[in-house]
Each structure stands twice: as C-alpha cells, then as structure tokens.
Image (spheres, grey):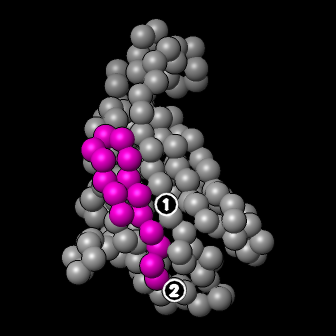
Amino acid sequence: MATIYHQVWINAPVAKVYDALSTAEGISNWWDKQTAVETATGQVLEHNPGPMHGVVKLKVLELVPDKHIEWECISTHPKTSPGSAWTGTHIRFDLYERGNVAGLSGFGQDGDRISVLDFRQIGYDEHSEYFGYNNFAWGCVLQELKKWCESRYRRS
C-alpha cells in the first residue's frame, strides 16, 4: 500500500488552518459542502460530489487542536469512480509552524512564521488506476485550502 503525500506552506496562523480542517463548516469553505452526522461510533463527515461517485463518508478518528486531524473513508463507490480507491484509507492532516521563511516566494519578512500542513492519504493501492488522478486532485484541493486560509488570515 502507498501513501499520497503533500506538504503545503500556508501564510496563516496554525489555529486558523486547523479551524478550516476540523469542522464541516470550515471544510465547506474550500472543498465541498460537508454535513456532519453523529453516529453511534462518532462523527462522520459527508459530501456528495455527484451521482457518478455517490456520497463520500469520512469518519473522524482524531482531532488534536492545532496539530492533527485524522479521518477514515468508510464509504464505498462504483468502480468507475476515482472515489472507489478511497475506501479504507486514512486521511491525515498534521500541522506545525515554521520560521525563517524570508526570501521564499510569497512568504514575508525575516522572523515571520508560517503554517506547514503535512497531508497524507494512507493505505492507498498504488496499482489503482486512480492513484495519479487522486494524487493530483488532492494537490488541487489543498491549493484551495491554502488560498482560502491566506485570503482571510494572511499575516502581513
């Protein structure tokens, strides 16, 4: 099994990035409209990218404020959907701050700090016909997160 990995540097406070990742309302701002459903085994985030895919269900496994979020994909999807490769995978967001970013394109002054997001989708079948597609799609989605956070919380 493989891991899809992206590291995103975001010019916004870690707490604001965490807020954008940890609630249905926050996620709805940059990805797809989410609904939080309380189940007997905990919270499940749901969104519907369309009839070709079916409802995506992500069970919230762990929330550590300003540090870590983990979901498990518990939904199943038609084999013709890129979402079919998600079932059983874990999606992790790890956050921390980094300093000394002056001189890097788009990142402020000496002494400024930025948020670093380490994203992983763990347990992915690297032989899936959708591996490359989903890897690219996550890059696009995470770019939307970055843009949303920076447009609202940019450090000056």
Residue placed under numbered mark 1 in the picture: 91
- Mostly what secondary structure, the magenta segment? strand
Which residue corresponds to the image point at 21% horizontal and 76% vertical from the top-left? 38
Can see residue 12? yes
Please tell me whether residue 142 is drawn above or below residue 82 in the rendered image: above
User: Considering depth in this image, is 26 or 71 the residue closer to the camera?
Assistant: 71
Question: Mark 2, residues whose alpha carbon is within 10 Å: few (<14), some, or many (≥20)?
Answer: some
Residue 102 position in % (x across, y down): 52, 14
User: Considering depth in this image, is 93 or 20 the residue closer to the camera?
Assistant: 93
Q: Which mark is residue 76?
A: 2
Q: What range of the chain is rendered magenta?
A: 61-75
Please tell me whether residue 5 is drawn above or below residue 88 in the rendered image: above
Q: Quadrant of the C terminus?
A: top left
Q: To which quarter of the image does residue 35 belong?
A: bottom left
Q: To which quarter of the image does residue 27 belong?
A: bottom left
- Disc 2 residue type? Thr
Q: Is residue 75 left or right of residue 21?
A: right
Which residue corresponds to the image point at 47% horizontal and 87% vertical from the top-left? 54
Please tell me whether residue 22 is drawn above or below residue 46 in the rendered image: above
Residue 86 position in % (x across, y down): 57, 74
User: Considering depth in this image, is 131 or 53 the residue closer to the camera?
Assistant: 131
Does residue 49 show up magenta in the picture? no
Q: Which circle's residue, 2 or 1, is located before the other in the chain?
A: 2
Which residue corresponds to the image point at 66% horizontal and 88% vertical from the top-left? 80
Which residue corresponds to the image point at 54% horizontal and 78% vertical from the top-left? 87
Dot 2: what SS?
A: loop
Residue 99 position in % (x across, y down): 46, 18
Q: To which quarter of the image does residue 37 belong?
A: bottom left
Residue 68 position in % (x across, y down): 38, 47
Q: Is residue 15 left or right of residue 127?
A: left
Whole-number angstrom distance, CA of label 2 to CA of label 1? 15 Å
Question: Mark 1, residues whose alpha carbon is within 10 Å: few (<14), some, or many (≥20)?
Answer: many
